[in-house]
Image (cartoon, rainbow, N blue to C red):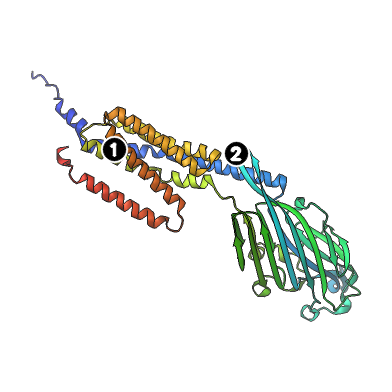
Amino acid sequence: MIEQQPQPQGFMNRLKESVTVKLVFIGALILLLLIPSVLIQNLIQERANRQEETIKQVSNQYSGSQLIQGPVLVIPYKKQVKEHNGSGKEITREIIESIYVLPDELNYKANLSPDILHRGIFEVAVYNSTIKVSGNFRKADLNLLSISANQLLLEKAKLLFSVSDLKGLKTNPQIKVDGLMLTAEPAYSDTLFSNGLQLAVNLSNNVDKPIPFEFILDLKGSQELNFLHLGKTTDVEVTGNWGSPSFSGRYLPDTRNVGDGNFSAKWRMLYYNRPFPQQWADDTGLLRNIKKNNDATFGVRLRLPVDQYQKTMRSSKYSLLIIMLTFISLFLTELIGKQKVHVFNYLLIGASMIIYYTLLLSFSEQVGFNLAYLIASVATMALIATFLTSLLKNKKAAVLFSFILALFYTFIFVIIQLEDLALMIGSIALFIIVAALMYFSRKINWDMQ
């Protein structure tokens, strides 16, 4: 009977010393660290969603984004319609329909006084505004509508306008129409606007002359102030003490001036690119058409200068790249310096680089992104440098590695700050990093490892 000899320890030792095996373990570790990286990104998104919910809640309590629509002149008229009764006999019945006339000239002049409301760690941009509205209406072209003058009920005409959140009205609007001062009332039965205000206007003594109007809206809102392009000529001027406005909608300002803590912008638009006719009959849903309404809406948004969640999310998306480059740098340091670093120590370093993003997120909510980035980066580099100094017993190598890590974090910070040049700068930097790794690895004899 032949006794089986124990396996030599040489194979196990070669396995432990194998560079290839260690690279496989490091690669598997990098993939494993993808799991907490995804969880961190989910946490950032959750906090960003919480911010949006807070903004909506505060806006709902204070006053939402405002959209100024109108005014529109509404003139009822009598219309004869033919129909069949129960016995099949044709009869003629008189109904009341309406003509809708848009302003010939429409002018808005708005001054914003913004403020920031705080709800916990979140900020919401709100404003008080004074909006002067003026213009005039001209006689409707009845021939285009196939309506005769004797069908009109001029004594029952009315003016309709709307603000998107009536809660924002601080005073009851007083409207001067054709020389008469009138008070607006809620238009509960109106289907032209969703939050309409109306006032009765007797036009029986004014058939051919232009009808001037003017009024002032003392209005508060949050985040945005928008206008609907309804005039044959629409002129808008908006000023405010806010340093980072964003002009939104289909129409950008003709002139703008954004200074240190204030801005001004002017629009002038003609009806050629307006999605609404100057006048129409019967169709109450025309101004509520979502696509046409969006095509004619424009205004200003009070953009907060820093969105820490967006920048933190962009940073976290580079986590895999940073971990991979860090591990490669540490691996090359290990080979060049002939000092072994256990895979478990790689795991600890990777964990500290994952925790980096929770530090960045939590501090950015308190002190802003830039300072938070500095705090998280310095803390992480100091931790890893101290750990490597104790581990390698080589202070010079630890300092060099920390310098490399600082370059990586600086590179990511620059990429985040850039927008148009981010791809080009990032590609060049990665090319340089790969070239450096190729240079430092050229003298390593991989076959002997």
Question: Can you say which quadrant of the picture contains the N terminus?
Answer: top left
Above-or-below relation of 285 to 351: below
For disc 2, the neighbor class at 10 Å (few under 14, some 14 to 19, many from 20) is: few
Report whether residue 389 is seen: yes
Q: Amino acid at mark 2?
A: Ile
Element type at mark 1? helix
Q: Residue at x 24, y 48 (%)?
A: 438
Q: Name, please, the residue furthest toward the front.
A: 260
Q: Amino acid at mark 1?
A: Leu
Which residue is at the front of the view, 93 or 356? 356
Cα–Cα gap, marks 1 and 2: 38 Å
Q: Residue at x 24, y 31 (%)?
A: 340
Can you tell which quarter of the image residue 31 is in? top left
The percent position of residue 350, horizontal first and vertical second, equals 37, 35
Q: Which residue is mark 2?
A: 121
Which residue is at the front of the view, 145 or 325? 325
The tag earlier along the polypeptide, 1 or 2, is 2
The percent position of residue 202, horizontal first and vertical second, equals 90, 69
Above-or-below relation of 131 to 430: below
Above-or-below relation of 112 to 400: below
Report whether residue 250 is seen: no
The percent position of residue 252, horizontal first and vertical second, equals 60, 65
Q: Which residue is mark 1?
A: 330
Counting labels gives 2
Q: Is residue 20 left or right of residue 279?
A: left
Element type at mark 2? loop
Checking the image for residue 374, the label placed there is none
Question: Can you say which quadrant of the picture contains the C terminus?
Answer: top left
For disc 1, the neighbor class at 10 Å (few under 14, some 14 to 19, many from 20) is: some
